[in-house]
Amino acid sequence: MATLVAAAAIIGPSIVSYGGSDAASDKRVDRSAAEIADAASDKPSTVDYRRLDERLTRLMQEEDMVALAVGVVEHGQIRFLKGYGETFEGSGQPVDANTMFRWASVSKGVAADMVAKLADENKLSLYEPVAKYSASLRLPGGNEHKATVSDVLSHRLGLFAHAQDSKLEDGQDARLLRANLATLNAICPPATCHAYQNVAYDAASDIVERVTGKSYQEAVRERLFLPLGMTSANMSREALLTSPNWARPHVGGNNPRPVEVTDSYYRVPAAGGVNSSIKDLAIWMQAQMGLEPSVLSSRALESVQSPRAVTPGELRRMRKFRERLSSSAYGLGWRIYNYAGYRVIGHRGGVTGYRSLIMFDPERKSGVVALWNTSTNQPAGLEFEVMDMIYQLPAKDWLDLDKLIERPPAPPEEATNGS
């Protein structure tokens, strides 16, 4: 159970916590604070932020919680940013809006957006064979000459799910593993079935590097993160470990223990390599809503947020929430749901000791992001509690705080980078 340490400034109906030594000099933080004040006075809110704060405070009393950071955007404005708990148990360092976490598979949206941006600039085509741009990806039967860039980003390569992930986690070279995909048996022709990938998905790194002439990390930082004001976002284990304010990963059930930061998915950065604060993840969500057209055009966003594959397996995995979700599809690096009749976009992620989520309605420009540093899936109900408030649906205990239930065990560590 986390020690509850969180400093919050209350502005109107909203709660925002910045903190950190660089908060005063961070212009984007200052602008966000102004936006929160404006939103509180100028825009009607359907989210009960005090109730949300109370729910999250109760969630932090659970024995398998250590650190949590949450952001909410309403009407395009950041209205709630707050950290809960400590960076690790007993540290005395409170989590705030600048604490660094891992995004895990939420990183896939970054890769898709970057490739779609290049396509929008006529520097590549999403419908050309991936072999034209990736020197490392090889598929069964030479299918890299048939599968398109779009097929890579929508997990439609004809491979079984999570191909070569276990070998990646054992420390094998990602580029060699991508080449060795050619030795596997295809389960379908490219573009005809969907099966989630990490090693193959990181061909997106090759694509970006081939087109831009820069490393994937450098291209994303220069073309996406910095123009958006995401000053904390990066893609390396070293950058996380050297941050003065970062949440340590924890594993186990009750009373989780801290562990070392694994490097497996940093070696496939397009699939799971991003680190950032919750503030920057909230800014990223704003960009996905079309609020930064000079960085991500409406055409680029439409290409990644349009359904490419129906994903009934996702509905089975999310069966607890089927009362709200009636359909699920995958675009390019993003999931698309029918949420009680509304179209929402989202993704989840998980690597050893970290979990993440993002869900938003691009039309209403409202949504929620969260990052935490244990294996528990319980905070995943947060996105449903917030979206229910946004849509003014009857409140439900999606966080499982109001009743005793037998929760399903967390999925195996590291291999969970498939949310």
Image (cartoon, grey):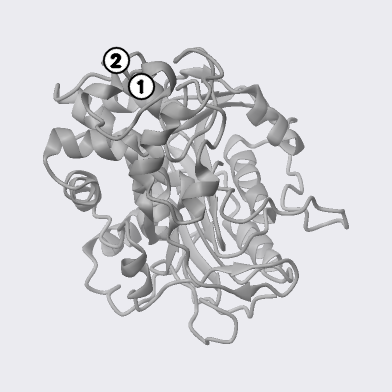
Kind of element beneath mark 1: helix
The residue identified by callout 1 is: 150
The answer to the question of whether label 1 and label 2 lie on touching residues, with beta carbons closer than 8 A, is yes
**Is 414 above or below relative to 9?**
above
Number of numbered discs: 2
Which three-letter amino acid code belongs to the residue tagged 2?
Tyr
Q: CA distance from mark 1 to mark 2?
A: 6 Å
Residue 95 tag number: none
Residue extending farthest left: 213
**Is 400 above or below relative to 224?**
below
Q: Quadrant of residue 209?
A: top left
**Is 233 above or below relative to 136?**
below
**Is 333 above or below relative to 217?**
above
User: Which residue is at a point 45% across and 59% down the rendered structure image?
Assistant: 102
User: Which residue is at a point 64% across and 62% down the rendered structure image?
Assistant: 56
Residue 323: image x %, image y %?
75, 30
Name the quarter where the C terminus is drawn.
top right
Residue 409 located left or right of residue 51: right
Residue 118: image x %, image y %?
19, 30
The residue identified by callout 2 is: 127
Front in this rendered view, residue 228 or 130 = 130
Front in this rendered view, residue 19 or 336 = 336
Crowd tier of the residue under label 1, counting other residues whose Cα lies within 10 Å: few below 14, some 14–19, many 20 or above: many
